[in-house]
């Protein structure tokens, strides 16, 4: 992921991606396979549709906190989404310029969970008494990058993690991974033919041995048929817990999106199309199943 302009936003996004790709092996596996097949020459040619973050909806945290960072860099808050079964809220944010990825931020509605689970989450977050973003110098890129990569609360113990996992796998993921980048997304439609549609791209992923999220079908499609999404299954990573135990748990994953051309631009030459002529925004039904890329129903389905 490279940007044409050298500025604080480019530095921030590149810094977040650099750490993410080192810890998610599928990123380089997919990129290298695309290079070997002559589809692209380098990672910089891949268009990043969006990146996503998970948060806890408690005082001083959640969307209202983390969004301040991206609003500072010129992003604009867009549509709201609700996920009743998973007890989540989310918004997406449009970038200040088309070359930057969209941002998707979700938060767990902690007050809708059982008392025991709320107590566990409070145990780890009770010392956060002010919004941590308010203390950041948002013009200092390295300070902002460090905020995403350094823990806001202590490492959980395995017993607490297991308790969270039983009721909310989202809660368990966040309490261990904190604000670590959840996923980045390859814009499939921006790739050269024949891999510029999601069906063909998923066939390519299958050929190179990438494990896919099958929740709701491998391809998740919006009701209007214009937004298609799929994702890898999060790889299980050996992780050390506070009590010294080491267990394999879900890390992050890679998503893929195909934004089809809006009907009014369907007859335009392909080489003249731009992002505003394609389906914009997100779809709750798609996103609901993409969340499950880190769930045990997917990560352990072949075990």
Image (cartoon, helix red, strand yellow):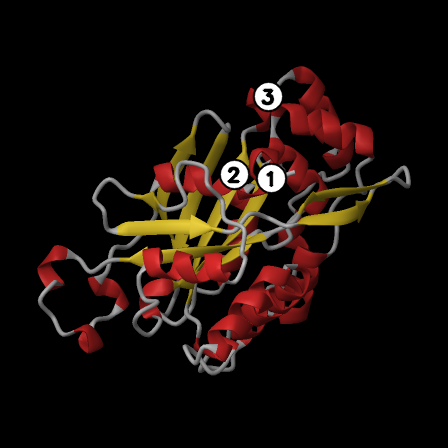
Q: Alpha-carbon distance for marks 3 and 2?
A: 18 Å
Which sits in the foreground, 36 or 271? 36
Q: Position of residue 228 (x, y in %)?
A: 32, 50
Determine whether the residue tagged by mark 3 lies in a helix, strand or loop: loop
Q: Position of residue 8 (x, y in %)?
A: 55, 74
> Across the whole image, how many numbered discs are drawn on residues?
3
Residue at which label 3 appears: 113
Whether 168 is drawn above or below 247: the answer is above
Q: Position of residue 168 (x, y in %)?
A: 60, 28
Determine whether the residue tagged by mark 2 lies in a helix, strand or loop: helix
Badge 3 vs badge 2, beta-carbon distance below 8 Å: no
- Residue at image position (42%, 68%) is 100
Image quadrant for the C terminus? top right
Q: Alpha-carbon distance for marks 1 and 3?
A: 30 Å
Q: Is 222 placed left or right of 104 in the picture?
A: left
Residue 12 shows in this picture: yes
Residue at which label 1 appears: 302
Whether 272 is drawn above or below 117: the answer is below
Q: Alpha-carbon distance for marks 1 and 2?
A: 15 Å
Residue at which label 2 appears: 292
Q: Is 199 placed left or right of 271 in the picture?
A: right
Give the farthest residue toward the right: 244
Dot 2 surroundings within 10 Å: few (below 14), some, or many (20 or more)?
Answer: many
Determine whether the residue tagged by mark 1 lies in a helix, strand or loop: loop
Q: Which of marks 3 and 2 is nearer the N terminus?
A: 3
Q: Earlier in the sequence, mark 1 or mark 2?
A: 2
Dot 1 surroundings within 10 Å: few (below 14), some, or many (20 or more)?
Answer: few
- Residue at image position (61%, 33%) is 169
Q: Which of marks 3 and 2 is in front?
A: 2
């Amino acid at each position: 992921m490279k940007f044409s302009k050298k500025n604080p936003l480019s530095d921030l996004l590149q810094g977040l991606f650099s750490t993410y790709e080192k810890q998610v092996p599928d990123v380089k596996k997919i990129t290298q396979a695309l290079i070997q097949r002559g589809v692209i020459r380098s990672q910089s040619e891949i268009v990043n549709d969006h990146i996503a973050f998970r948060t806890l909806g408690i005082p001083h945290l959640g969307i209202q906190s983390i969004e301040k960072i991206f609003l500072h860099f010129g992003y604009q808050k867009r549509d709201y989404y609700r996920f009743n079964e998973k007890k989540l809220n989310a918004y997406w944010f449009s970038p200040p310029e088309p070359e930057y990825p969209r941002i998707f931020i979700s938060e767990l509605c902690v007050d809708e969970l059982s008392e025991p689970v709320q107590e566990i989450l409070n145990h780890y977050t009770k010392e956060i008494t002010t919004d941590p973003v308010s203390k950041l110098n948002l013009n200092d890129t390295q300070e902002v990058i460090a905020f995403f990569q350094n823990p806001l609360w202590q490492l959980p113990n395995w017993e607490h993690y297991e308790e969270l996992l039983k009721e909310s796998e989202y809660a368990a993921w966040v309490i261990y991974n904190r604000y670590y980048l959840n996923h980045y997304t390859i814009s499939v439609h921006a790739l050269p033919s024949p891999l510029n549609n999601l069906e063909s791209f998923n066939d390519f992923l299958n050929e190179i041995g990438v494990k896919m999220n099958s929740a709701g079908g491998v391809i998740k499609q919006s009701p209007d048929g214009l937004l298609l999404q799929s994702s890898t299954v999060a790889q299980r990573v050996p992780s050390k817990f506070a009590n010294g135990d080491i267990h394999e748990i879900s890390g992050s994953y890679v998503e893929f999106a195909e934004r089809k051309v809006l009907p009014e631009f369907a007859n335009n030459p392909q080489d003249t199309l731009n992002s505003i002529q394609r389906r914009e925004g997100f779809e709750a039904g798609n996103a609901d199943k993409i969340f499950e890329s880190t769930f045990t129903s997917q990560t352990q389905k072949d075990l």
